[in-house]
Image (spheres, coloured by chain):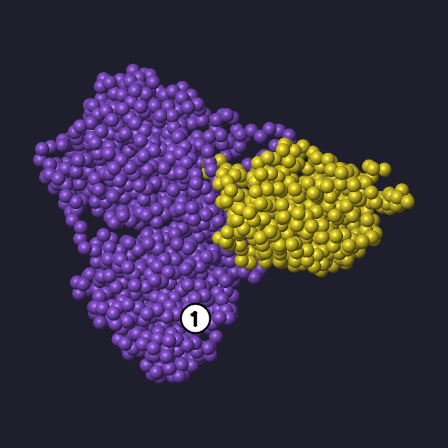
Amino acid sequence: MKTILNRLLSFTLLLVFTLAANAQDTRFKVLPAEQTGLKFSNTIVETEALNVLSYEYFFNGGGTAVGDINNDGLPDLFFTANMGDNKLFLNLGNRKFKDITQQASPQLKGRQGGWKTGVTMADVNGDGWLDIYVCYSGKGEDDMRRNQLFINNKNSTFTESASAYGLDDKSLSTQAAFFDFDNDGDLDMFLLNHSNKKIDNMELARYRKDVDELAGSKLYRNDNNKFTNVSASSGIRQNPLTYGLGIVVADINQDGWQDVYVTNDYNEPDYCYLNNKDGTFKDVAGDCFRHLAQFSMGADIADFNNDGLPDLINLDMLPEDNKRQKLLQLQENYESFELMTSQQLHKQYMRNMLQLNNGDGTFSEIAQFAGVSNTDWSWCPLFADFDNDGYKDLFITNGYLRDYTNKDFLRYWGDYKVRKAIDREPAKLMDLVQAMPSTNLYNYMFRNTGNLSFTNQKEAWGITSSGISSSAVYADLDLDGDLDLVVNRINQDALVYENTSDKKGPVNYLNIQVQYKDKNLFGIGTKILVYAKNSKQYFEVNPARGYLSSLPANQHIGLGTASQADSVILIWPDQKRQALTGVKAGYHTISYGANTIPNSPAPTFQPLFSTVSKSWIAYQHQPVEINDFKRQLLMTFMYSQTGPVIKQADLNKDNRMDLILAGNPNVGPDIYLQQANGQFEKRQVSLPASDFNRFISDMEFADVNGDGHADMYLAMGGYAYQEPGDSSLQDLLYINDGKGNFNLAATALPATNRSAKSVVKAQDVDADGDLDFFVGGRIVPGAYPVNPESYLLINDGKGQFSKASIPFAEIGMVTDAAWADLDKNGRKELVLVGEFMGIHAFENENGNWIDKTGKLFPSGLNGLWFSLAISDVDKDGYEDIIAGNIGTNTQLKFDQAQPMELYYADFDQNGSIDPFLNFYIQGVSYPFVSRDELNDQMYSMRRKFSSYKDYSTATMEDIINPDELAKAGKKNATESKTLVLLNKKGRFEKQYLPAQAQFSIITEILTEDFNKDGLPDLLLLGNKSDNRLKIGSIEANYGCLLAGDGKGGFRYIAQPETGLKIKGDCKSALTFQKEGSSYLLIGLTGMPIQVLKY
Amino acid sequence: MRWIIICIFLFTAIESKSQVKGFEQELQPAVFSLTMVMMHDVVNPPAAARYYTYSTLGAYDFMAMLNKELPHPSTLFRHYRELEINPDVKKLDVGFTAIYSIYEAGIELLPSGFMLEKQQAAFEEKYRKKGITAAKLEYSKEIARKYVAHVLAFSKTDNYNKLSARIRYTPSKQPGSWYPTPPGYIEAVEPNWRTIRPMLLDSGEQCKPLPPVAFSQEKTSAFHQLAMEVYEVANAASQEQKEIAAFWDCNPFAISSSGHMMVGFKKISPGGHWMNIASIASTKARLPLDKSIYVQAITAATLMDGFISCWDEKYRSNRIRPETFINRQIDSKWMPLLQTPPFPEYTSGHSVISAAAAEVLTHLLGDNFAYTDDTEIMFELPARTFSSFRQAAQEAAISRLYGGIHFRDAIENGVTQGKEIGAIIVSKLKGSVVARGPVNNR
């Protein structure tokens, strides 16, 4: 007994020791300034004259540059301080640094009274020694803002020479990037500037052509160390609306010429400048990206998923936690958003954007999928492999000294002015400044999981110092084979994290310094491809990245378990290719060599789909111009947009399929009859003239009267304009005369106007030889999320229908339906999916409807389903189900353990349904609604929560008392992923589809052998842009083709291989045969019908 | 003859039993405390007028119960019924009860009404110290609360709480339609205010104004000329015109942005401004408390009806603001002197409610009633002196042209609309004149 106790005790002790050891043994360790000698702090002193209210970029922070200024192999550091002295530190080795500012050049400290910003280390004059360029901004006189260039005297001293080089620019500068934009062998300069006067009017397209010499960015061309301002002819934007905060240089489109990404704060969109190879740039941000960060700050470009393509991240300021989301200002103004998009400012949202390069000129924004979208007031993102596992991780700095968007503070501000006025006292800015709350925030260290996502390693890796962090750099400061971190902070010592990976075991890495020629000896713009085992990694030598920072020119490459790189391929700026094989782990310098060969462009292959140059159907969809949230303020999505709808049927029995298109508000379907020559004859079907607000949401073609011709059923949808019972919600049945002419059978259908419908499917339900209809109810107009009525309409054989009683008449908000014999018992089940619904199956057994859901499907399938397809994907003779969900690339995170919940009732008894969406944030379920929205929806709440702070921690029970909540309606969702249910002989098994299928809402699923390998594939289409602004447009799907392996497994086919670049909200899609060829037809909201051949 | 009437008033007042005097001086601070909370809450102009109405109605009903010379609110206000209680007047303090009820109503009605609790307590403490017995205070409070509860129940039937169930305004892209304006691009304020039950009018449509000048982008059109007038007047505004515009700005929430921060500079709403004018005039006329309360209550109801009528037209014509039109057609960088408020342009709200209030105040306190308006001093805007309420209303109306936020027809037709509203209300008030002329002019 005693021994057992002893053993237990020692085991416990052992456990404690192990835990304690683990706690200290984090990957990163803070090195105190006393130890390193890096005594530097960006000290900000707030005064009545100079503070965040008088200068809005007061807390944007100081810059950090890392580079080897004395060519001794050790990375040295330079920090800028906005108000205090800049400092240059020489790396003495062994993690010791020496402040050599005074000896190197007293001027390096910066101009007294000037406002220093970004700093860059670059070999400006091409002599092989790093020079230092310091930017200035602020409210001072022009001459206080002239940027400084410190030329390296090759003896650890510098001479300020900006004027001699023509670089003593007096703009309001954020940062400079040196790179060779014209491929002439020397470094040119892009100077990123910002405006200092906010222009609130958003109808100012004409401002965009103005040139503001101080605010607009500038491009300087280097001609023999004389820099010439060539901005005017370069195509870059220089208007007073630009607020440049971040710049990254990279060959974004992989054409061998350096491109530039510039982020802009506020309403001005970011610019993605592609190099036109003729000294000019073209901004393609609107083409490449579906949406952008609104208050864009720092940015980085790197290939984080190891597919050889550079990806982009840029930062914004959406907090991670519920409390700060509720306390700080968020985007909720639909009016200004609408104006923003109408002014070609693109869709911009307040969150970090991770733009995954699809390789075809498009990017999928997946920050929410990847888990890196909400990192609060973030400045500097850096992609680098901090754990040497072969995948680039992501470090993000965070912090702002004053929470000046705190909504309680904003209210206080208004009252303060009034109170001071009443007391006849002058309003003091400092009173306000000091009233602003200050929150120390944590930085983020995301480990790349290798499957397109990241996990925060704050605790595990020891990135736990809080503060106000600004710029940051990484470098292997101690040459021990792992990347250390240095962060420039406000009012605190610079933070130095030593990476101790090497002490935890062997680290495999390459550190490659390239040596190029001419005046670009550091090889800026060189590409490095590293192959090790089965992995490929891609790097570009471009120190301009992050925020106010410049990074090492040498590239640090983690090799994971490989002790060497199988091969290293360099593509030099002159597009020569140089290959090395069997490169051992460790430090290497690779010089531009004789054994280079011209780099041949990557082989292009014939994509599976190609856009038909001239579409044969001139159908242009007209969107419904309405904001559904004006009717029910607290909904998450809009529902009015139902079109376009595309269907095919042989309407005139000529053995050629005809096309039917519908969906324009209050307009009947257009019939396109296919002629023998492949042309189409267009006919129009008119809707009854008496009503308006008709929105066709689905069509079905079925012979209802037994004359052998396909008749037409029109299901009516919509939301904003209708009331339940309106005649405009009544479905319509048209009888085909056999020649493709349709006549309304005005009395054929019973009343179907209690709900807006989404789907209609014909089936002989009662086995009486005629076709009946199931019509799925989508929503009750004005009463989301009350269960709408679905209908089963029974045919009397002559085309006269009556409403059957069904147990699933109010099953939920149905989005899609299908008839299929899932259990192979000879009777077809009705399969239903919907929003906040499970996947359901009902079978008609001799007039009795049997719910087979529980028998067939696993539990926990409540989701936000938008589509459904039935197909035997594993070729076992049983029909499988593919169901399209909302995906995981949204703010709405939910699963079995942390379900998303929707409570609804007319809580304030004013005649409107008050829906409250709740989902988990950091382990607690909170209402999604902001205090302002809540107050607008329920006036009584204005009293309940007297401040934003009061509301910031409120859960559902704090808003509605438990008694009332218990009486309210409740829906939940536990599954967000698009998946396949594999039919194992009548019992279904859940299998998730690949990551790319989860990037967006899936609204259409086509099953076919698209790649013609004999196995069934899936084509997933989707997107939905009409959502709450806090959700934003969900549109990372450009057409996702998943190749099937015939066993139920699927593999994503890259976009360049498929040729799919579908941009927009897909509402319908089908494959169509014409003249022996296959076509893909896609209906996008507000767009012409897309026709692709395959 | 006038002297006699005044004497009767004085006599009535003196005769008012063993009551504490001086509550006349408590009325303005009480109503103004509501104004302060409404500023804090950024209550929009139509909603503010509604709050003033219900906050003063209890006190008015109570006073009308005691002084049968005052027309009872149930004879004036649609659907309003008298509170049928018979309080023992000897056990309460009349002035205290009335003023207390105003604070109490504010606490109950206003979103941040709790902010008034301290002031209400201080008010009670003051009169406790002045010698009102605890029993009397308690009974007075009890009666005040009964009136407030009665009014609150009445307020719940005016459709206000159904507003959030109605479809809001989606900006139209039609060229002449109102579109949200810089810098805040705030969503249209109270698009369904027409559905609120008016106090004295039959409906919001009763005083429907002439239609606005037809929209046109043609340079020769009447509409373009209206826009050019705003542009030119604003660009050449004199110092006095600028002062007038600022004096009547009354924007509850003019947004100013600094970086990421959008802050609102708060001011008293147009209705709040006229409530204070009514206070200033009542004080100047040395009205006793009951008459002062009557003036406050009728002014508030007039403002409420004025806004209902005006908002009915605003969302009928949905007309574009000068700033939007001028930016699109004349000068892309032009900004009006005042910040454009977030609702359609036609008719001018300040014109309508100022004209209506001026008619009613003229009826109640006399024409050519000169007074000095120091309401805006707290916003560093010097006091202005007016020879009559109507002169003030005219100035308030035309200030919107100087301020660059209204076209002339919205001002002129708005004044006509307001006068009509005023005339209808005055006709209902017949025989209830409080003072026959300005006290100071005799």
Is residue B198 something one can see in this rendering? no
Q: Nearer the viewer, residue B250 or A1016?
A: B250
Count the marks: how many?
1
Q: Quadrant of the C terminus of chain A?
A: bottom left
Quick check: A207 left or right of A356? right
Residue positioned 57% across, 60% down in the render: A909
Q: Is residue A741 left or right of residue A514?
A: right
Instruction: Give residue A597's position: percent from left, percent from top.
Output: 11, 38
Q: Position of residue A424 (x, y in %)?
A: 64, 30
Residue at 25%, 20% (x, y): give it.
A152
Residue A578 in the image: above or below residue A339 = above
Q: Colour of chain A?
A: purple
Q: As rendered, which of A954 and A110 lies closer to the eye?
A: A110
Res. A721 visible in picture: yes
> Hey, which quadrant is residue A7 in on the image?
top left
B303 vs A556, nearest the viewer: B303
Q: Which residue is mark 1?
A: A686
Task: Place residue A639 in its image quadrant.
Answer: bottom left
Q: Position of residue A852 (x, y in %)?
A: 34, 72
For residue A467, what is the image quadrant? top left
**Percent position of residue A1001, x then y:** 35, 57
Question: Hey, which residue is sitting farthest left in the picture?
Answer: A595
Q: Which chain is yellow?
A: B
Which residue is rendered at x = 48% and y = 29% of the image? A51
Q: Chain of mark 1?
A: A
Q: Amino acid at mark 1?
A: Ser
For the point 50% across and 44% down, which residue is it?
B329
- Which residue appears farthest toward the front when viewing the image? B220
Helix, strand or loop at label 1? It is loop
Crowd class of label 1 (few under 14; some 14 to 19; many from 20; radius 10 Å): some
Left or right of residue A852, residue B21 in this image: right
